[in-house]
Image (cartoon, helix red, strand yellow):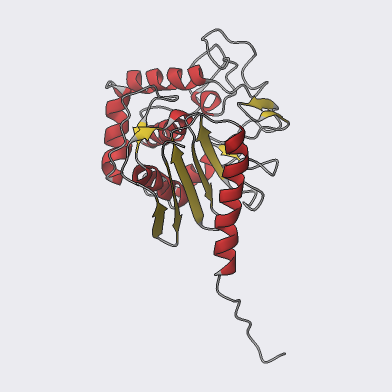
Amino acid sequence: MPFAAAGVVHSGQTVTHGDDARMVPLASVSKPVTALAVLVAAEEAVVDLDEPAGPAGSTVRHLLAHASGLPFEGTVPIAEPGRRRIYSNDGFRVLGEHLARHAEMSFAGYVRAAVCEPLGIGLDPDGDPAAGMRASLRDVLEIAGELLAPRLVADETAAELREVQFPGLAGILPEWGRLDPLDWGLGVQLATPQPTWMGARVSRRAFGHFGGSGTFLWVDPEAGVACAALAEREVGDWAKEAWPALSDAVLAELAAHAPAPVFGGGGA
């Protein structure tokens, strides 16, 4: 492993292991950042989640939820919108173009103004909206903290991000295979069915994303914790073993140190 670092956000505190300042490719962990920028744009009335975007019949919401019908790579749809969960890089490229056009500024410029500057992070959004951003672990944990306790968007918008969009759709998750259903929110995978790459201990309310460069980020609102890891090694069987094990260990450690419940009354 040429490089790896990991960290946790919990109860307003951040704990890291490894170099948390080194900038590395995020690969598809870029997508939640793009989604967050789109949600800020929706609250600013720059875009509307249900306005047309992408293929005929598709909307911004379809693109965020990988339900537009666009293929993994390519701009010619292979299904009608809302019929299949087709993980699509080009769907997020279309989103980036759509946001830039409506905001009348570059996609990267909007991400900097709407996400990076308010959070005080040095994330580099100049690359592909689907998989081309670069960031440090420190940056990714700030994004994780925002997803855990939103400041940039209203609670209602944050709740919609983690709700299943177009329920019941099956699909193929890269590296993991076919899942039925493959539940997706607005730019993030949901932890159903379980277990997932997020491990077996996360709650059914957990959500996150991973990237082909060895990166992942998940958030569990029920446990009040977020976890992220960055690496520079292409995803493979190692990740299928390491990621769930790390995630389960984090949640087991938190459970072991949780305060004992306090019971009222005078009974035994």
- Mark yes or no: residue 17 visible: yes
Residue drawn at 64 percent across, 14 percent down: 80
Horizontal side, residue 145 vs residue 186: left or right: left
- Above or below, 183 against 107 in this view is below
- Residue 17 percent coordinates (x, y): 41, 52
Horizontal side, residue 59 vs residue 230: left or right: right
Residue drawn at 58 percent across, 56 percent down: 249
Placement of the C terminus among the 4 image quadrants: bottom right
Task: Name the image quarter holding residue 66.
Answer: top right
Q: Nearer the viewer, residue 199 or 117?
A: 199
* Extreme residue in the front direction: 1
Task: Name the image quarter holding residue 240.
Answer: top right
Residue drawn at 36 percent across, 34 percent down: 24
- Above or below, 103 against 198 in this view is above
- Residue 228 percent coordinates (x, y): 47, 45
- Mark yes or no: residue 187 visible: no
Q: Nearer the viewer, residue 238 or 266?
A: 238
Residue drawn at 35 percent across, 43 percent down: 139
Q: Nearer the viewer, residue 240 or 35?
A: 240
* Extreme residue in the top direction: 76
- Residue 32 percent coordinates (x, y): 46, 35
Task: Name the image quarter holding residue 123.
Answer: top left
